[in-house]
Amino acid sequence: MTSVTEAPAAVAGPAPGPAPRRRRRRPFRPAAGLLAWAVGLLFFFPVLWMFLTGFKQESQASTDPPTLFFQPTLDQYAAVLGRDFVPYLLNSLQASVLSTILAIVLGLPAAYALSLVRIPKWRDSLFFFLSTKLLPPVAMILPLYVIAQNLGALDDARTLTLVYTAMNMPIAVWMIRSFLVELPKEVLEAARMDGARRFTEMRRVILPMIAPGLAATALICFIFAWNEFFFAVNLTATRAATVPVFLVGFISGEGLFWARLSAASTMAALPVIIAGWTAQRWLVRGLSLGAVK
Amino acid sequence: MTAQTTPDTARRGPTTREPTRGERWIRRTPLLPGLLFVIAMTQIPFLFTVYYSFQDSNLLRPDSGSFAGISNYGRVLGDPLFRNAVANTVVLTVGAVVLSLALGLALAVLLDRAFLGRGIVRTLLITPFLVMPVAAALLWKTSMYHPVYGLLNWALSPFGVGADWVNDFPLLSIVMVLTWQWTPFMMLIMLAGLQSQSPEVLEAARVDGARPFAVFRRITFPHLRRFVELALLLGTIYIVQTFDAIYMITQGGPGQTSTNLPYFIYLQAFRAFDVGEAAAAGVIVVAATLVIAMFALRVVSSLFEEES
């Protein structure tokens, strides 16, 4: 499960042959490929349908049988944007981007202390972060609500930012740590031999090497924060409500506003779909908190 | 952990004395801001939840707030709606985890081979997991499940099948959405497992004349076991907390037939304003999660040992 022991070992193992080609030696089976394509398209179809419906007129969105061919229109996008969608978008953007930055800023030093520096009981601290990920949000929401109420911080995007930062900290710490322990020891030692101080070492040697990893971690944190609904719906009302809360407005649409709903959903989902496609390679590492690479 | 000891000794240089107390605190400083922040944001609220669970507290009665002993726990455990929510949570979680794991494994086996456009298929397959859960829930509730205009009934009509999915089969409807969303997650973990197999061993087995199924059963499956365990535990922990799909698709209904624990606590706290009972239910959920989590931590921990 660790690339340290398995994947690279397999590549750089005792057999010095053209190892990277090994996967291609597997038999090429057109039938399996066709099946994979069929299932892939089936899984993707609802998303595609949502995307298409957003370009329909309302009268074409709910029909029996479904309308497959139509003249695309941007009316629904105009209607959603005209319906005060933008403030929700800005709230989402603020809470997700700021919480992602905070999670990295707090998570990077913590991950550093828990991997490259030897501190007592580092393992306990590491697992403490993990255990907070296992704490159900429902067990914290009431006090958070009451505390925020007493501080006058209800319906405030900053409150949501802090909550999302805490929510993403275990992912940030574990994921960044998984990149740090993969750094080649020789490089770190060489830097220390040169008498590099810890901060300089971090800035000049470590940061450039784990920059892709940090970017991946940031994307994963962003995905979770952007899609988050439970805290958003309970801690915000009108001023700080985020995009998922906007979508609640469509909850009772009995076949009335499906096209508009699809346009709004597409806009809501698109940032994370793009972020997720970009971070594909690291998605599994983020979701498993660095356990699977 | 060699990665940690070696640089450390190097830093200590010629004087190999133990770090003093002050030095240890200096080393700890990078950890502290993050650690203290997380403690403040998660542990303090949880302690409050424990406190509320022993209080007779209702947001609608400002005078309430006296010590209630364990009566909230008694009320929760005696509440048929709570037991109903526990049963629904088990059905939803087991159903969605098992289905998505099975599908995910099958898809991972397919994607482990080379074929034209494999990268594109992988990208298509992970997309359901990325769609904002609230948007996905609305999409299924309307375009897929609607009894008249829904695509599901339209696609099934040649077989004479048709239903008012959300009202007639609320739990099944939720399980299907969750399976759609979580299969990509399971697939990614399984795929990582398949691709971390030693190619030499597989090659050797094939050279020895082992048939593909025997190779899968004897070599691949034992290798995958830890990945399956991890997927099961992580999937369970994430799916137990399902809230979005229920809030958006069924609102726990009809009646309370699809209310799970998170939604039950939400109703108690924010609709009935019964803080005491909601908090007690929350503490019970945490206790139950802790049991699952201990297994999860053990699995992660064992992966961790190998790394060191």
Image (spheres, grey):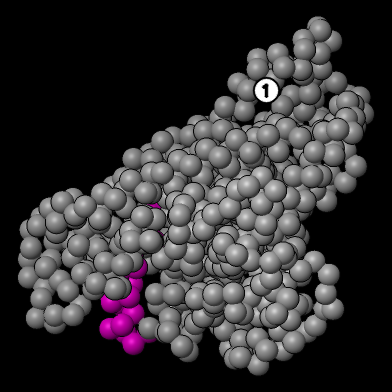
Where is residue A100? Give x, y as percent.
58, 69
Residue A140 lies in magenta, yes or no?
Answer: yes
Lateral position of residue A51 relative to residue A90, left or right: right
Most distant residue in the front direction: B160
Which SS does the magenta portion mostly show?
helix
Please give the name of the residue rendered at 19% of the width and 54% of the height, measured from the top-left corner.
Answer: B79
From the viewer's side, name the closer residue of B10 and A110.
A110
Q: Amino acid at mark 1?
A: Thr
Identify the element where label 1 is drawn.
Answer: helix
A135 relative to A166, above or below: above
Q: Residues within 10 Å of mark 1 (few under 14, many from 20)?
A: some
Lateral position of residue A114 relative to residue B276, left or right: right
Locate residue A25: give its quadrant.
top right
Whether residue A21 appears in this view of the structure is yes
Q: Chain of mark 1?
A: B
Whether residue A175 appears in this view of the structure is no
Locate residue A132: give its quadrant.
bottom left
A202 relative to B109, above or below: below
Lateral position of residue B59 relative to residue A70, left or right: left
Where is residue B251? Give x, y as percent.
41, 65
Where is residue B197? Give x, y as percent.
71, 27
Q: Quadrant of the C terminus of chain B?
A: top right
Please give the name of the residue rendered at 83% of the width and 70% of the height, measured from the top-left corner.
Answer: A69
Residue A282 lies in magenta, yes or no?
Answer: no
Residue tagged by mark 1?
A: B220
From the viewer's side, name the closer residue of B274 and A112.
B274
From the viewer's side, name the closer residue of B223 and B248.
B248
A149 relative to A206, above or below: below
Q: Which residues are magenta?
A: A134-153
